[in-house]
Image (cartoon, coloured by chain):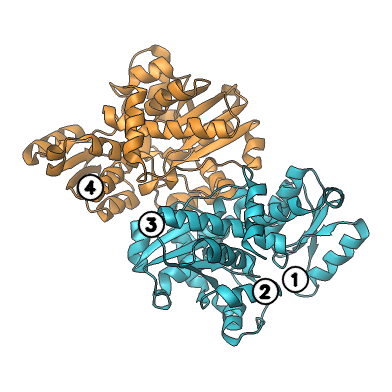
Chain colours: A orange, B cyan
Amino acid sequence: MNIEMIEAAAARAQGVTRRTPLLSSPALDALAGRRVLVKPECLQHTGSFKFRGAWSALTALPEATRANGVIAYSSGNHAQGVALAAQRLGIPAVIIMPSDAPAAKIDGTRSYGAEVVLYDRGHEDREEIGDRIAKDRKLTLVRPFDEPQVIAGQGTCGLEIAQQAAEHGVTHADVLVCCGGGGLTAGIALALEARAPGLRARPAEPAEFDDTARSLRSGRRERNAREAGGLCDAILTPQPGELTFPILSRLCGPGVTASDDEVLQAMSLAVRQLKVVAEPGGAVALAAALFRRDEITSDTVICTISGGNLDPEVMIRALSG
Amino acid sequence: MNIEMIEAAAARAQGVTRRTPLLSSPALDALAGRRVLVKPECLQHTGSFKFRGAWSALTALPEATRANGVIAYSSGNHAQGVALAAQRLGIPAVIIMPSDAPAAKIDGTRSYGAEVVLYDRGHEDREEIGDRIAKDRKLTLVRPFDEPQVIAGQGTCGLEIAQQAAEHGVTHADVLVCCGGGGLTAGIALALEARAPGLRARPAEPAEFDDTARSLRSGRRERNAREAGGLCDAILTPQPGELTFPILSRLCGPGVTASDDEVLQAMSLAVRQLKVVAEPGGAVALAAALFRRDEITSDTVICTISGGNLDPEVMIRALSG
């Protein structure tokens, strides 16, 4: 994993992925007690950053392999990213999704032409199911984060952050990244190391699913006590990835966390102040920036809003709070 | 009014206003029966395109005049645009707002440091009030649309649409613009005439406040039967402007309209498919693109989402529909 792979992924994505803007609002600055810049990846194709990694991975495959099709397991955002990337490349895609994923994500995945296979998150192992189908149909498995070309694709978001921070005159900042398996965080960290060394990536997680923060403290991959049931469905991974963790461990600052209630408040503020839709897992970095200000020392904080795919009831809940 | 004024406004706005992206979603294309590209001006500073015109007008004033301060009357979006532009230039701003404007807009205007004066929309004339205070305090009145430098500023949105349409390979399209007094529509129409002549601006209005559509048909400025009470608070102007109407009349295609129910559906779809927040008056162009498809003939339709400032209850209503 290196910056050349990220630059190559950016070249393959030219004219395909969106360069999302960098947003801000005086009201959020006042709440956070510092300048807050927000990278709304909810505005990316399929409503999350995952399209970046999916496009990178699929376009990096040898053409003959790619033509057989791909398979992925995902709670919904990686699913939609792989489905749309496959559709655009004209190849088949099978997506293994938990049966309790938001309906909007299951419907979205199907709308991009993928075949969806549902499994029970509590009792079945999605990786085992994925491996079996992949073998049967000669599909290439596109892992959601432990896959170098996926990490490289997510890193293109970091290249944009480096450029846009410079355009805003920002040379030093903590960059809070919504973190599940760590693909986006690792990709951004690698891009910043090379292109904006004064910017430091830090993983942001739900308070009860803080495996990455604890792993960074202990120096080894820790597991969450639970693997389901939290509000932030997009980032409920059991532990940091095998490939991502060494990158995070080398490059990232301490993890930050936010409670579900803080996440809902951040979702409401994203609507009111930034006019963008953040899903719970996509709002955890903004929530940490706004409500855990004592854990941040930089004058400017940059946060990803990693996705905006949610069932409307969840947004109604956030706005009613 | 000409393209040189718009280009000059764009130069003054360099590094100040945001270049909003152009968004799309396969689901919206399917609904509309054609390609739909959306220009989300809700992501502009202050949550609407109005900051463009305000910045243009204030930066075009002679410095000695500008230093005395400015005054504006507005249902809320022009108010916030002028307030923030004044704050950034370090000058005083007085804003005359209707007492029934959304609380979010009144609060927003105050948060940018402006002095807010409320009036009764049914019984008082905002222009009369504005003129009196302006004379008393030597403030320069910044009209919301009938002001050349404001129209020039809104035209910078049209320059971006011309560039971005070309980037998307679009040379012919109807451009539906949410229309109140016609400042944004006129500015965009002028920019497209010069920079993208295959793109045609068309005003979009609420069905019961379709003064511009009727005026384009009759060839003279028609008035609405009512001046308040509609869902789309941002664009409930009594009739097209004196300066804007001749421009619309010369350059625009026929007006389109949408019902309040269609506007609420468009707001919900903007959240689900584009992950952006459209206020009712900002969703009317998208509503027309999606639900009045028989009135559009071009293969691609471009719509502005002109603003996203709304009280949360309105969004909850849209999402609950």
Tag 2 subunit:
B
Q: Which amino acid is tagged 4?
A: Leu
Pick the residue in front: A30 or A12: A12
- Give percent across and percent down for residue B105: 67, 56
As drawn, the residue found furthest toward the bottom would be: B218
Q: Which mark is residue B228?
A: 2
Q: Do the residues under discs 1 and 2 have CB atoms within 8 angstroms?
A: yes
B180 vs B92, left or right, is: left
- In the image, B232: left or right of A151? right
Q: Which-is-in-front pick, marks 1 and 4?
A: 4
Q: From where the camera sits, is residue A1 visible?
A: yes
Q: Which residue is mark 4?
A: A89
Disc 2, SS: loop
- Real-space Cα distance between discs 2 and 4? 51 Å
Q: Chain of mark 4?
A: A
**Which numbered disc, 4 or 3, marks the residue closer to the eye?**
3
Residue bearing mark 1: B121
Q: Nearer the viewer, mark 2 or mark 3?
A: 3
Mark 1 in CB contact with mark 4 (< 8 angstroms): no
Whether residues under marks 2 and 4 lie with C-beta atoms below 8 angstroms apart, the answer is: no
Q: Position of residue A229 (x, y in %)?
A: 35, 38
